[in-house]
Image: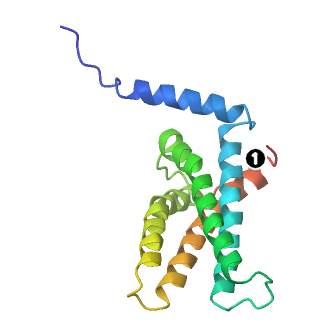
Amino acid sequence: MRPVTSYAPAVPLADVNEVYTDLVTSLFSSTIAAKAWFATAAVVLAVVQVTTAARMWGRLGFLRMHGPVVALVHRWSGRLAFLFTLPVFFHCVTILGFETPDTRVAVHSLAGTFVYGVFAAKVLIVRDRSLPGWALPAAGLTMASVLALLWLTSSLWYFTNVRFGI
């Protein structure tokens, strides 16, 4: 009888990690560079989300888009922002994990544990018409704030301390 090894579940994960690394490094200089750029795209789209939401709520009169166009840009920027977070999430969870070697990384790891919970809450709030009027803007701003905090504690650090480039 063959003994059971404790590292057997890690083998498929290592294969996925290798394929991911090969794929990402065919486009970017490193997996960390890919993470920084995908997160940057998500944050830029979050700014579009906040801007279009403010326009839909009548807070930005100078923005020339109106009605269904604003709603369409808002929805698609949110969908794309979510998609851009997926490779970042994969990288953080499967390669880096939860770490606390210093304050920046600890804050980043802690905020990262909340990001999809905040996203789920925002999606549920969008669908629930019984909530007070402030609930949706609060959820949207919380989502944008968590993404911004994650970007500030990872991508900005990467671009200013490691390298700026693809």
Residue 115 at x, y percent in the picture: 49, 63
Q: Which residue is mark 1?
A: 162
Toward the top, the furthest residue is 1
Determine whether 131 is above or below 104 in the image: below
Toward the front, the furthest residue is 68
Q: Please name the residue shown 45% across and 59% down the image.
A: 113
Left or right placement of residue 40 versus residue 129 in this view: right
Determine whether 130 is above or below 105 in the image: below
Left or right placement of residue 98 versus residue 3 in this view: right
Residue 60 at x, y percent in the picture: 73, 89
Q: Please name the residue shown 47% across and 85% down the image.
A: 135
Snapshot quadrant of residue 72? bottom right
Disc 1 crowd, CA 10 A, few/some/many (<14, 14-19, 20+): few
Determine whether 138 is above or below 11 in the image: below
Q: Please name the residue shown 65% across and 61% down the image.
A: 151
Determine whether 86 is above or below 62 in the image: above
Residue 78 at x, y percent in the picture: 60, 65
Left or right placement of residue 58 versus residue 121 in this view: right
On the rendered image, what quadrant is the N terminus found in? top left
Amino acid type, callout 1: Val
Q: Please name the residue shown 75% across and 47% down the image.
A: 162
